[in-house]
Structures are given as C-alpha cells and as structure tokens.
Image (cartoon, grey):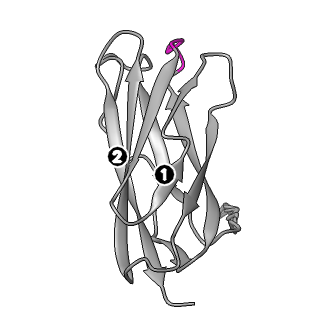
Amino acid sequence: MKKLVLIVVTVSLITLSGCYTVKSSSSKGGSVLKGEGFKISVPTFDVGMKQGEAQSVAVSVERGESFKQDVKLQFKAAKGISVEPTSVTVKAGDQPDVQLAISVPKDAAIGVYLITVKGTPETGESASTDFSVKVAAP
C-alpha cells in the first residue's frame, strides 16, 4: 500500500505603496555580537521626484533583540536637493521610523542625487547607508 503525502505551500504577496521597499545595506552598528547591533533601512529603489516637488520618505532603525540604545541619525543630501531634519535621535523605546522631508528646487538639475544616512549609538560602532533620489522634469 502506497502512502500519499500532501504538501501545502502558502505564498503571500505583499504590495508596498510608494513603489519602493527598504534595504538595510549598512554594516552592523553598535556591536559585532549577534542581536546586539542595529541596521538602518532606507528605500531600495530610486525615489522618483520632479523638479519643484517635495516628498516624505521613511527611514527606519532595525534593532537586534538585545540592542537597547538610543541611535542618532544624521542625514546628508547631495548638493542640489535638501532633506529635513538633518539629524534626529531615535530613543530606545520610540517607534523606529523617521519621516524625512525631501525637497527638490524647481531649478534642480535632472539626474540622480544621493542621500547618506549615518546612525551613531550611545556606545559602539556607527553604521551608514545611502539611497538615491532621481529628479526628472515636471
């Protein structure tokens, strides 16, 4: 007698609004020990913007299960666009997401601009990553 084995595989598809997902390409900050560090998540794909436009983008601190420190995030935009705030501290008990306001002047050159995000914990090593803003004509 042969036995029939039934295997069920469930696949979930998640669609994100805003046409981008997050990446965490920063080196592990805070510590080299598992679970005691943090990473910085930023948009994976170029953030598309038009000349004269402003847009909000989320940046997040991903903490290891044992990482309980505040992290100071610093944001630096390439010359030609601006980002606010330029610095914020994400407290250990706060929500990990920070909303950045990116502004592109009407006379900004068409092209790709880099925004660098650096996270510095109270003690330990900092981590950094960046993402791109692609500016097009209106």
Dot 1 falls on a residue whose secondary structure is strand
Tell me if residue 32 comes above or below residue 80 in the rendering: above
Identified by mark 1, the residue type is Val
Residue farthest along the front direction in this orientation: 107
Residue that appears at 35% across and 80% down = 111
Place of residue 43 in the rendered image (x, y in percent of width and height, measured from the top left): 50, 58
Label 2 element class: strand
Kindly identify the residue that appears in the image at 34 percent across and 46 percent down.
129
Residue 87 image label: none
Residue indicated by mark 2: 129
Please tell me which residue lies in front, 131 or 113: 113
Q: Which mark is residue 42?
A: 1
Measure the C-alpha gap from mark 1 to mark 2: 8 Å
Badges 1 and 2: C-beta atoms under 8 Å apart? yes
User: Is there any visible trace of residue 6 in the rendered image?
Assistant: no
**Residue type beneath disc 2:** Thr
